[in-house]
Amino acid sequence: MSGCLFCKIIAGEIPAEKLYEDEKAIVIRDINPQAPWHFLVIPKKHYSALHEIPEHDAPTLLCGLMNALHQTLNATGLNSNGYRLVVNSGASAGQTVFHLHIHILGGRDMQWPPG
């Protein structure tokens, strides 16, 4: 997607603070953090939301995201302090960049309900 912010970051057209990168995903620090630790796990392949991933692509793409997430949790130490994962889908859910991504939030107590 030529106008997608995350696609431009992945292509190296826009700088971002990368914490992790492999052939399937990148993890960057969120530029508008909602917690002391706020990272985004972004697949390199563009899909706007989870429900748009075709069945044939889902296992590989989702495993790649979980691996990037796992690597980030271990590298940052969030796995020992608690964290929240958030996937927004659609504008009414708070999605502002329409490229699938997982928010990792940590470093403070989280409230419930989250919405």
Image (cartoon, grey):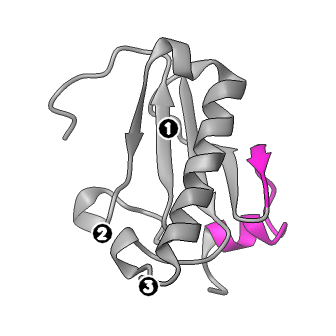
Q: Circle 2 is placed at which residue position?
A: 90
Residue on which the image places disc 1: 104
- Mark 2 vs mark 1: which is more N-terminal? 2
In-image side of 104 versus 19 (left or right)? left
Q: What secondary structure is marked by label 3?
A: loop
Mark 1 residue element: strand
The verdict on residue 62 being magenta is: no
- Rendered location of residue 88, percent (x, y): 34, 57
**Residue type at mark 3?**
Pro
- Circles 2 and 1, Cβ within 8 Å, touching? The answer is no
- What span is in magenta? 6-22
Tell me where residue 67 appears, x and y as whole percent: 63, 48
The answer to whether one can see residue 30 in this image is: no
- Cα separation, mark 3 vs mark 1, equals 24 Å
- What is the quadrant of residue 112 in the picture? top left
Q: Residue at x 66, y 35 (%)?
A: 72
Q: Is residue 15 above or below residue 34?
A: below
The secondary structure type at the circle numbered 2 is loop
Q: Residue furthest right?
A: 12
| Image side of residue 43 versus residue 94, left or right | right
Q: Earlier in the sequence, mark 3 or mark 2?
A: 3
Q: Determine contact: label 3, label 1, CB under 8 Å.
A: no
